[in-house]
Image (cartoon, helix red, strand yellow):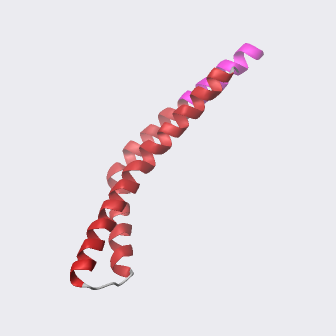
Amino acid sequence: MTEDTILQVFKEALFLTFKIAGPLLIISMLVGLVIAIIQAATQVHEQTLTFVPKAVTIVVLLFVLGSFFMSSLETFFDSIFDLIAQISSHSG
């Protein structure tokens, strides 16, 4: 296995991490921002008013985007297993 192959695998893994975590984090931050603006306008500063909408939003996003996340992970792991099979067939 060459350095280029290892770097390519790490690059794909990092990109996959951003692809999966990015939408969840961005939407969660936007929901938090909207809640913070509403809290500032109404001067109601209750911690559960921030936590519950974010948690509900993340759960809904996981249900909506879960199949996309799983197919992305499946594709990545298939490529990793194919790479392992190629390496083991060349060495043996």
Give the vertical position of 1 relative to 50 (above or below): above
> Which residue reaches farthest right?
92
Q: Is residue 65 left or right of residue 11?
A: left
Q: Is residue 75 left or right of residue 85?
A: left
Q: Nearer the viewer, residue 79 or 8?
A: 8
Looking at the image, which residue is at 38% across and 68% down? 55
Give the vertical position of 33 relative to 15 (above or below): below
- In percent of width and height, residue 13 lies at 54, 37
- In percent of width and height, residue 78 lies at 54, 31
Q: Quadrant of residue 26?
A: bottom left
Give the vertical position of 10 relative to 45 (above or below): above
Looking at the image, which residue is at 23% across and 75% down? 38
> Which residue reaches farthest top?
90
Q: Main secondary structure of the magenta part?
A: helix
Q: Quadrant of residue 85?
A: top right
In the picture, the quarter occupied by the C terminus is: top right
Looking at the image, which residue is at 72% across and 21% down? 88
Q: Is residue 88 magenta?
A: yes
Number of residue marks: 0
- In percent of width and height, residue 4 lies at 63, 21
Q: Which residues are magenta?
A: 79-91
Q: Is residue 23 left or right of residue 73?
A: left
Looking at the image, which residue is at 46% across and 44% down? 18
In the picture, the quarter occupied by the N terminus is: top right
Give the vertical position of 24 relative to 56 (above or below): above
Q: Nearer the viewer, residue 32 or 40?
A: 40
Q: Is residue 72 magenta?
A: no
